[in-house]
Image: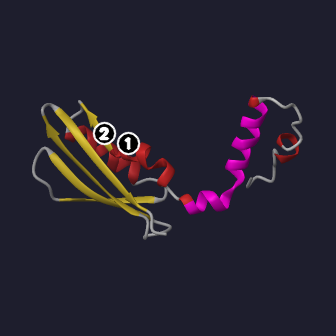
Amino acid sequence: MGDGFSLRPFIGNITIDTAKAKQLRDLYDAYVDTAAIEKAGLKPARKDLDSFARIQTLDGVAKVQPFYSKQLNQGDWLVNFSDSPPGSFKATFTRKSNSRVSGTLSAGTSSGATKILMTLAVPR
């Protein structure tokens, strides 16, 4: 791990032969297998990320847009909103430290709910 602390001496020395001990060893081994993590990329998390990318809220666009503007314009992100028809918005956002990492954000009101769609592109 990055902070110099390793659980390997504890996990690797578990000698109790139980299913729980094996789960713990397997979980730890998967966590520290950075080559496999890098190879898999976002694929294992894609289903969850896709569900997060399509969000609905009862808040109107007038409340949703300032929220995303504030959240994405802090830290390592920069967001730019483009002209959009009333009741909707479109934006692009980019990492300040790596402009190749970017995404899109859009929202519009339909049937009393504001539907938000966010995409993120992380080049390999």
Q: Residue 66: give x, y in percent of width and height.
A: 29, 45
Seen in the picture, residue 110 relative to 36 is either above or below; the reply is above
Which residue is depicted at the point 59% across and 61% down? 38
| Left or right of 12 on screen, residue 65 | left
- The disc placed on residue 3 is none
Which residue is tagged 2? 55
Q: Is residue 86 one of those drawn in magenta?
A: no
Look at the numbered discs 2 and 1 and tell me whether their residues touch, using CB distance below 8 Å: yes
Q: Is residue 26 one of those drawn in magenta?
A: yes
Residue range in magenta is 20-39
The amino acid pointed to by label 2 is Ile
The number of discs equals 2
Q: Residues within 10 Å of mark 2 (few under 14, many from 20)?
A: some
- The disc placed on residue 52 is 1
Q: Secondary structure at mark 1?
A: helix
37 and 110: which one is in front?
A: 37
3 and 53: which one is in front?
A: 53
Q: Secondary structure at mark 2?
A: strand
Q: Residue 64: give x, y in percent of width and height.
A: 27, 41
